Amino acid sequence: MNAKLWRFPGGLHLSGHKTESTRLPTQRARLPKRLTLPLHQHIGAEAKPVVAVGERVLKGQVIARAEGYVSAPVHASSSGTVIAAGDFPVPHPSGLSAPCIVIETDGAEQWCERHPTPDYTAQDPSHLRNLIREAGIVGLGGAGFPSFIKLNPLGKTVDTLILNAAECEPYITCDDMLMRERAAEIIHGIRIMRHALHAAHCIIGIEDNKPEAYAALVRALRELRIDGIQVIQVPTRYPAGGEKQLIHVLTGREVPSNGLPVHIGIVCHNVATAAAVHRAVQLGEPLISRYVTITGPGVPEPRNLEVLLGTPMAELLQQCGADPSSIGHLVMGGPMMGFSVHTSSAPVVKTTNCLLAAEHAPAVQAAMPCIRCGACAEACPANLLPQQLYWHAHAKEFDKAQNYNLFDCIECGCCAAVCPSHIPLVQYYRYAKGEIWTREREKQKADVARARHEFRLARLAQEKAEREARHAQKKAELAGKNAPRETAPH
């Protein structure tokens, strides 16, 4: 019996370019001589270093601790010696350098002490969340939000856990290969997540262009004799892997504007995150490696590699037969939502799912005026009005852009892909969001400064009043001592 599916608005049918990188089994990437580990590989506060230059570290050892609630620690991906700590190139749209710890590997791959928890069912959900937090696990299919937070519903009832296995963007196949090769690890991780959430239902949503991965998941569930987890194939249509889009397709529920899935009783995680959760809890291993797709017209032998975090991208290109010096265009992610990496010396980080390489950057066509054709609105999977957002962003009318639900835009790029005027619409939306966030931060700083100023004035006024009270009291006491005393008559 087929499950009932719903349809999200808009979307595109894109050329997949996926078979190129799935012909060969995943191979372990070679151990690099140096690992460069950025302190900020996640949404939230940057991790704080706890090792010094010259210190020897072991594989899996914490080298930077989480700073605050929304943060994630960083671990040594291999054993070796810390040889530097400072700003180095990192994969980021800005092209700027950022704080990193550099380890010179010793080839021993010596692990630190690990503490596996084989029987997760005997553990309290809060303990499991702490294990996942200490392992540095973040969302491996998106922006890198710390995973333990999404496993803490904070009093809200979660009835459904959804595992995102859609992997809808062209060229990217790391999740596909992970499902084919390590389906059991994914299932074990799902069971841990489900236990932490007390979710009654669990669905794995996978696009119907991945028959081998689908069969592997179904086979793993049968061999492990696990009930209560459905594997549902959804139509291949970009961006079916968008969190809100997949939730709607599988359940018919709509995540409210400016809301979260947990507000409608759903939590959504990526399948690679589930595998990482299994390794963290049941094997005691932190997040120090991941599957990465190495592909594109500039890669002679496209494939997936299991890569230690911190490995230079150039070494992965070389392992797939490419000459890094001949690569003129390197993208982290896919062609729709990825961003250009300015140097192949940048390291693989927790959110690196794909490296898309070409000898030359694609030609950029000059943008022409909007002709109000409406093609962008028809393609938008979030049911927005992209042309209105563009006009307001272009005019720097950010409040009006917010009124048109700017922050519901998932930046999938469908609108820009169909625009006959070649307007880089997503760039305008990102610009508007950035300006709004900057203004909000400045407002918060101003509010904090004003509150501090008002507190200081209040404190000074209180201190002045207390001084005056003490002075008046002393004056009264002194007046009492100097007052003439009445003498008794003789």
Image (cartoon, rainbow, N blue to C red):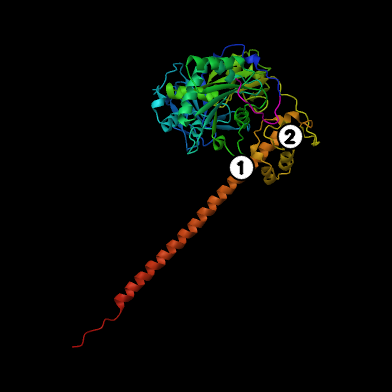
Q: In the image, residue 209 lies at what x, y percent?
A: 64, 18
- Near mark 1 (Cα within 10 A), the count class, few <14, some 14-19 or many ≥20, is few
| Residue assigned mark 1 | 437
**In magenta segment, residue 148:** no
Q: Is residue 391 toward the left or the right of residue 451 in the image?
A: right
Residue 369 or residue 275, whichever sits in front: 275
- Near mark 2 (Cα within 10 A), the count class, few <14, some 14-19 or many ≥20, is many
The residue at 71%/21% (across/down) is: 360
Residues marked 2 and 1 touching at CB (< 8 Å): no
Tell us which disc is closer to us: 2 or 1: 2
Q: Is residue 156 above or below residue 365?
A: below
Q: In the image, residue 222 lies at what x, y percent?
A: 50, 15
| Residue assigned mark 2 | 377
Residue 184 or residue 264, whichever sits in front: 264
Q: Is residue 44 toward the left or the right of residue 404 in the image?
A: left
The residue at 50%/38% (across/down) is: 156
Q: Secondary structure at mark 1?
A: helix
| In the image, farthest residue toward the bottom | 490
The residue range painted magenta reads 1-12
The residue at 41%/25% (across/down) is: 120
Instruction: Give the residue type at disc 2.
Output: Ala
- For residue 422, what is the image quadrant? top right
**In magenta segment, residue 8:** yes
The quadrant of the picture occupied by the N terminus is: top right
